[in-house]
Image: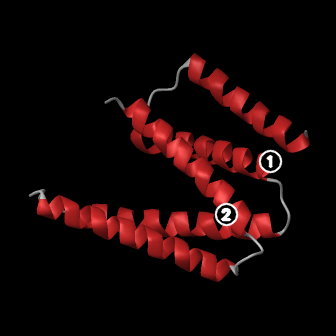
Amino acid sequence: MGWIVYASFAAIAMAAADVFIKLAAGKVSNSLGVLIYGSCTFTMGLAWVLWQKIHGVTLHGQTSGLLASVAVGVSFCLVTVALYVTFEAGAPISLVSPSIRLGGLLVASLVGFLLWHEPITLRYIVGIVLACGGIYLIITR
């Protein structure tokens, strides 16, 4: 199974998370919503580790990988808090979600170029320009 399938699943799950945060915003305190999110993430992570352990998968972790994993958790927690606050303030999901996702993709792309020296092609530059134009068109409607 290629990475596109996994990425597609991640996109669907990310969209579902946005929809559910929008539904919960204002109906549950932001801190409680983040606590529930964290509890679900912990439970699923624990179940996955236990499943792998039962199936003989060796768990390993270098210090740099463990620190990066903590940073992932903190980052997603901050995204969740920001989404709760944004939706509670009445922002429409049709503007917020695409803007945040495309903005995050642009920043991640920049990091890829700067830290990992990933190639920059003309086609990719055109894609970046179109993504920026998309964010502008979405926000300004």
Q: CA distance from mark 2 to mark 1?
A: 14 Å
Residue at position x 83%, y 54% in the image: 92
> Which is nearer the eye, 84 or 114?
84
Which amino acid lies under the numbered mark 1 shown in the image of this protein?
Answer: Leu
> Which is nearer the eye, 133 or 57?
57
> Which of the labelled discs sits on residue 71, or is there none?
none
Looking at this view, name the residue that lies furthest to the top.
122
Q: Earlier in the sequence, mark 2 or mark 1?
A: 2
| Pointer 1 local density, CA inside 10 Å: few below 14, some 14–19, many at least 20 | some
Looking at this view, name the residue that lies furthest to the right.
141
Q: Would you say 121 lies left or right of 133 here?
A: left
| Pointer 2 local density, CA inside 10 Å: few below 14, some 14–19, many at least 20 | many
For residue 1, what is the image quadrant? Answer: top left
Q: Which x, y percent locates residue 133?
A: 78, 31
Q: Which x, y percent locates residue 141?
A: 91, 39
Instruction: Tell me if I can see residue 61 in this picture.
Output: no
Secondary structure under tag 2 reads helix
Whether pointer 2 and pointer 1 mark residues with C-beta atoms closer than 8 Å, the reply is no
Which amino acid lies under the numbered mark 2 shown in the image of this protein?
Answer: Ile
The relative height of residue 60 versus residue 8 in the rendered view (above or below) is below
Q: Which x, y percent locates residue 94?
A: 79, 46
Give the residue number, with chain letter if any, for mark 2: 21
Give the residue number, with chain letter if any, for mark 1: 95
Residue at position x 71%, y 50% in the image: 97
The relative height of residue 61 versus residue 136 in the rendered view (above or below) is below
Instruction: Tell me if I can see residue 81 in this picture.
Output: yes
> Which is nearer the eye, 6 or 105?
6
Q: Would you say 49 lies left or right of 119 here?
A: left
